[in-house]
Image (cartoon, rainbow, N blue to C red):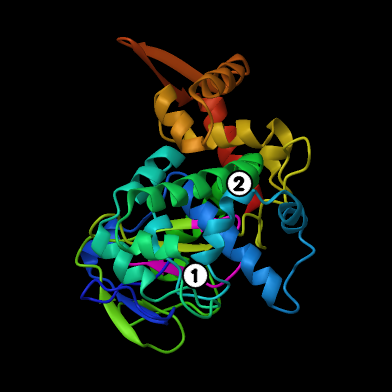
Amino acid sequence: MGCRSETGARLRRWIVVRVNFTADDLARTRFSVAPAPLIETGLALVELRRASVTPGRPAARRWLREVRRTFPATARPLLELFGPYPPWPGFADSPASSLEEGLEFVRSTPRSTWRAELANGCPDRAGRPPCWVRNLADGDTEARDIVVRALRDFYAAVVAPRWESVVSSFHGDVARRMPVLAAGGHQALFGTLHRQLRWQDNGLERQGVDFEHDLGGTGMLMMPSAFWTGPPVFVLDGERIPNVLVYAAQPNGRLGGPDHASPSGEAGNDSLAILIGSTRAAVLRALAEPCGTADLAATTGISAASASEHAKALRDADLVQTRREGRSVRHSLTPLGRTMLGRLQSAAT
């Protein structure tokens, strides 16, 4: 959740950036196929820190009140690394669609990267960092295990119980913006993300410019976040992970978030989720492109067994068809399923 300069060093403050696009970059700029558990975990933690120090922030949001009561003790080390203000460490920037893949990204972070990022320190911490943080900067394995366990436990306590709503908010936002992209291209799409974000002279920038970054023909991955409520966050790496633009999801033209699902799993004014439930709606949306059960599970953030059950229910309703390919199966929408998905998404926009 930070920016990198052209030398690869993590910047000392979260600065305004201008990202320059070539024609190849625009052609390769696309939406992520699913929310990223590790990114959502990091952003949920930052939102919690921001709410505790900023007067007037929406501290009454239900999930924030609940987290204060259920915050796991094993996740407390993260408070030494994620402050309410940037910069935030980049080891939680993995856009992988599975938590385990994201945690492997943390484990494989080079020692030089740990040292460079931790040298900036936590913005609200005074004095010398604790011993384990200094050990982390030195590449200590036990210190790295502390971070991995903390991230896993925070995800389990805070993010996982709200994952259906996260997925619903993600797909609802993408569905709302796709017609904008189709009608007006990337310039029109970027204009819908945040009032501080603008397209100018073949580049995407926030107000003012402190430094520029060239994507180098690799494009950018766009990822709506259910937990995040701030301005767009650029993850400009291009080496270990793709360049990513994370922005606050607005599935119904306003901020979504993990509070927007009712106890029954229905998500706000999402017509499709109201009709068939948020998880099943996410499965139907994911099948806009045919895929197997494992890919369907990864895209929607559920288990393979659950993905298979939801696909069967949709198949029984004549919305999905499944055909066997060797030892695996491939799911796709039926004409009725595609028509239903298209009409309800159009209504939502």
Q: Nearer the viewer, residue 29 or 34?
A: 34
- Asked whether residue 20 is in view, the answer is yes
Q: Nearer the viewer, residue 309 or 160?
A: 160
Q: Is residue 19 above or below residue 254?
A: below
Residue at position x 73%, y 56% from top?
68
Q: Position of residue 122 (x, y in %)?
A: 49, 73
Q: Is residue 99 above or below residue 9?
A: above
Q: Position of residue 1 (x, y in %)?
A: 43, 65
Residue at position x 50%, y 78% from top?
123
Q: Residues within 10 Å of mark 1 (few under 14, many from 20)?
A: many
Q: Nearer the viewer, residue 343 or 72?
A: 72
* Residue that badge 2 annotates: 159
Q: Residues within 10 Å of mark 2 (few under 14, many from 20)?
A: many
Is residue 211 shown left or right of residue 55? left
Is residue 106 shown left or right of residue 320? left
Secondary structure found at label 2: helix
Q: Position of residue 18 (x, y in %)?
A: 35, 80
Boundaries of the magenta span: 224-236
Q: Is residue 135 above or below residue 339?
A: below
* Residue that badge 1 annotates: 232
Q: Does the magenta portion include 289?
A: no
> Could you give the CA–CA distance between mark 1 and mark 2, rounded to whole angstroms?
20 Å
Q: Amino acid at mark 1?
A: Pro
Q: Which mark is residue 174?
A: none
Of tags 1 and 2, the one toward the viewer is 2
Q: Position of residue 272 (x, y in %)?
A: 66, 39
